[in-house]
Amino acid sequence: MSVKKEAHEISFTNPDYLDTKKKLDSVGCGMCLAKWTQVTIHLQMGQTHSCHHPSTHRIPVGELKRNPSALHNTLYKKQRRKEMLEGKRPAECDYCWNVEDNSTGFSDRTFKSNETWSKPHFDEIKNLHWRADFNPRYVEVAFSNNCNFKCSYCGPSFSSAWVQEAKEHGAYPTDDKFNDIEYLKSQGKMPIHHKEYNPYVEAFWKWWPDLYNDLHTFRITGGEPLMAKDTWKVLDYIIEHPNPNKKLNLAINSNLGVNDKLVDKFIEKIKRIED
């Protein structure tokens, strides 16, 4: 208990975190830079969210036709930014409000706003109009749910092997309808087949050349990324267009359970990128 208390006290008295929270609170009690600087985009479902705490929301295809960056800059998300800039607390960020209202510690809005992919952009963001687009610096993207594994903690939204499993044997008999195909369809989370036309992937490639120039961290997840043709397209693009920031953090969440030829191909391209 004493060790935990000591670690908590060190964190709460950290001058860097204190400075960041002071700046955030000068804008409003609900201000968080992650709503601008961080995003996870599930292209296989057409869903997005900034920060891992809020639930994902649907990306309207109509918005993408006018603005490919709506993969991140949805009108819904901009309305949440507006609340933050006006001193309000978005309801979807209740995880942080629960932490702040029931403890003396920092919530993730401080930690994420203090990251190197967030903090340098504070002045720019606080002066932006809430309708303005902003290129995120930390981007995580899933191109498809194509995957050769069907891990029990995963599900059809993130594994094509799980789709087949659920179609053949049905969902797990749980109260929350885990892995239930019909439930996923009703929630708009049934993935687009990786061989079918995907307007969200199309929008990504329209946005990519502009987004790439501002990236701090780019993470590819899935599905199994090495089974997605777009992963290889990203790697080839990076090889042909060295990132202007020279400090791109590239991460790929792979099970490495694919055939050896794909793994060897992956290693070869990563070596070229490192060089």
Image (cartoon, rainbow, N blue to C red):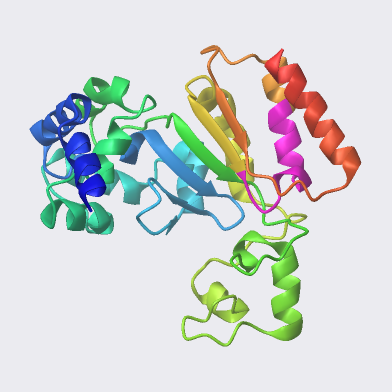
Horizontal side of residue 216 vs 123, given as left or right: right
Would residue 13 be visible to someone looking at this image?
yes
Q: Residue at x 34, y 36 (%)?
A: 36
Which residue, as the protein is rendered here, is positioned at the far right? 261
The quadrant where residue 262 appears: top right
Q: Residue at x 29, y 25 (%)?
A: 119
Q: In percent of the image, x 33 and y 51: which residue is there? A: 76
At a point 75% along the width and 66% down the height, the residue shown is 161
What residue span does the magenta drawing correspond to? 221-235
Q: Main secondary structure of the magenta part?
A: helix
Residue 131 visible at all: no
Whether residue 249 is situated above or below residue 57 in the rendered picture? above
Residue 231 higher or lower than 275, as above or below = below
Q: In front: 26, or 77?
A: 26
Left or right of 206: which side holds 187? Answer: left
Verify whether residue 224 appears in magenta. Answer: yes
How far across and down, in percent of the image, does residue 149 sit?
74, 61
User: Relative to residue 132, is residue 213 depicted above or below?
Assistant: above
Residue 10 quadrant:
top left
As displayed, is residue 183 above or below residue 260? below
34 is within the stretch colored magenta: no
Whole-percent x, y for residue 243 in the image: 58, 16
Residues 230 and 24: in front is 24
Task: Please state the total of marks drawn on the protein image.
Answer: 0
Residue 246 appears in which quarter of the rendering? top right
Q: Nearer the viewer, residue 158 or 17?
A: 17
Residue at the far front in the pictured view = 2
Locate the C terminus and report the quarter of the image it occupies.
Answer: top right
**Residue 141 placed where, x, y %?**
56, 43
